[in-house]
Image (cartoon, rainbow, N blue to C red):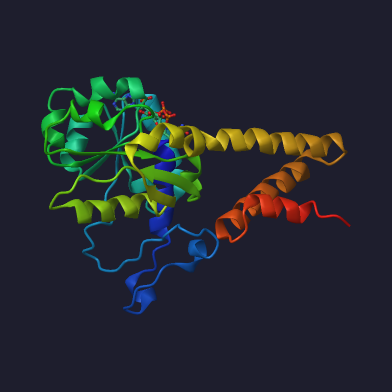
Amino acid sequence: MGIAIISGVIASLESIPSAREQGGHHYGAAKWESHTPGTLTPTAQSPSDESLPSRYLACVSREESAKRLRDVFFSLGGSGPSIEVLVGQNVRAVQEADVVILCCKPQLARSILTEPGLREALDGKLLISILAGVTIAQLTALVTAPTKVIRAMPNTPCRIREGMTVVTNLPQSDSSELDRAKILKIFSSIGRCRFLDEKHFDACTALSGSGPAFACIFLEAMADGGVMMGLPRAEALELAAQTLQGAARMTLQGPLHPAQLKDAVTSEH
Ligand SMILES: NC(=O)C1=CN([C@@H]2O[C@H](COP(=O)(O)OP(=O)(O)OC[C@H]3O[C@@H](n4cnc5c(N)ncnc54)[C@H](OP(=O)(O)O)[C@@H]3O)[C@@H](O)[C@H]2O)C=CC1
């Protein structure tokens, strides 16, 4: 999931119009806004915009994962190859970061956050956990009091900037406005981003976090139905995928409820 997030952020930043292209003015790149309501392409408002990420460090524990990540990031093109992949150097990476996104399996959170030196390195920083089922209370018990802990629940389409991410609200502090801007820069650039209370997170994990898997089961079944009726498989998959995409976008763009959209297809002749 960490790869999906970073790939989406890199793709989004690649589409920022340069200051020269903007002619000194800033505007959103229409490419994504035109067809993905809610997805924002960050604009290069000012070279000193503190909320825009400028350096990326990806941490893994195994050399073979590092090689796989480097290959993926290289294939992204643009600034993908500049992502630094560190093996077994979590403390160093956190020391050098402003924002830390925790993307390990939920059961590894404790051992990673209690590694000697990590609490100190995290002190006062923004820690975003995407771990399913691990609460803010459990995480704050492992870090120092000034560390700002929030939860995010993204989904795999973040990779192509079509994600849905739910984020918990930030505790009020002097830096909450800047932190909120950083969170929005990351997650709005890779899809829709919505702030919700933590009490909704299990539901969000089931609905949008795991939702792409449910959608793919339905999509595959639709395509199988087409194949059963004689369609070539590739075309059946294309028809099913584009149909689901179209139906989803019509729902997002409104104003009709899905039940009305369904009725419009099943009208009497
Ligand atoms: N999959 C999904 O659709 C979604 C997942 N999530 C959440 O995302 C999290 C990750 O899931 P997923 O991406 O599937 O898991 P993966 O196992 O694919 O990725 C976990 C990553 O963490 C790294 N890692 C593990 N231990 C360490 C360590 N000690 N130090 C540094 N890096 C480490 C792994 O590298 P290495 O292999 O080298 O150890 C690996 O790259 C989970 O908590 C899940 O709940 C949230 C939303 C959606």
Looking at the picture, tell me which residue is in the foreground, 15 or 120: 120
User: Which quadrant of the figure has residue 83?
Assistant: top left
Would residue 58 appear left or right of 191 to someone viewing this image?
Answer: left
Residue 193 is situated, as x and y percent measured from the top left of the image, at 40, 50
Q: Can residue 55 be seen in this view?
A: yes
Location of the N terminus (image quadrant): top left
Would residue 25 appear left or right of 253 to someone viewing this image?
Answer: left
Instruction: Tell me the residue at 19%/51% (across/down).
Output: 176
User: Which quadrant of the figure has residue 73?
Assistant: top left
Count of number-bearing discs: 0
Location of the C terminus (image quadrant): bottom right
Q: Is residue 54 visible?
A: no
Residue 55 is situated, as x and y percent measured from the top left of the image, at 27, 49
- Position above or below: 172 against 118: below
- Position above or below: 131 against 29: above
Looking at the picture, tell me which residue is in the foreground, 253 or 8: 253
Within the displayed image, which quadrant is ligand 1 positioned in? top left
Residue 214 is situated, as x and y percent measured from the top left of the image, at 59, 33
Instruction: Tell me the residue at 11%/39% (across/down).
Output: 146
Residue 210 is situated, as x and y percent measured from the top left of the image, at 51, 33
Looking at the picture, tell me which residue is in the foreground, 137 or 158: 137
User: Which quadrant of the figure has residue 137?
Assistant: top left
- Position above or below: 144 against 74: above
Instruction: Tell me the residue at 35%/75% (across/down).
Output: 20
- State the residue lying farthest toward the bottom: 23
Looking at the picture, tell me which residue is in the foreground, 56 or 163: 163
- Position above or below: 221 against 34: above
Instruction: Tell me the residue at 62%/58% (across/down).
Output: 256
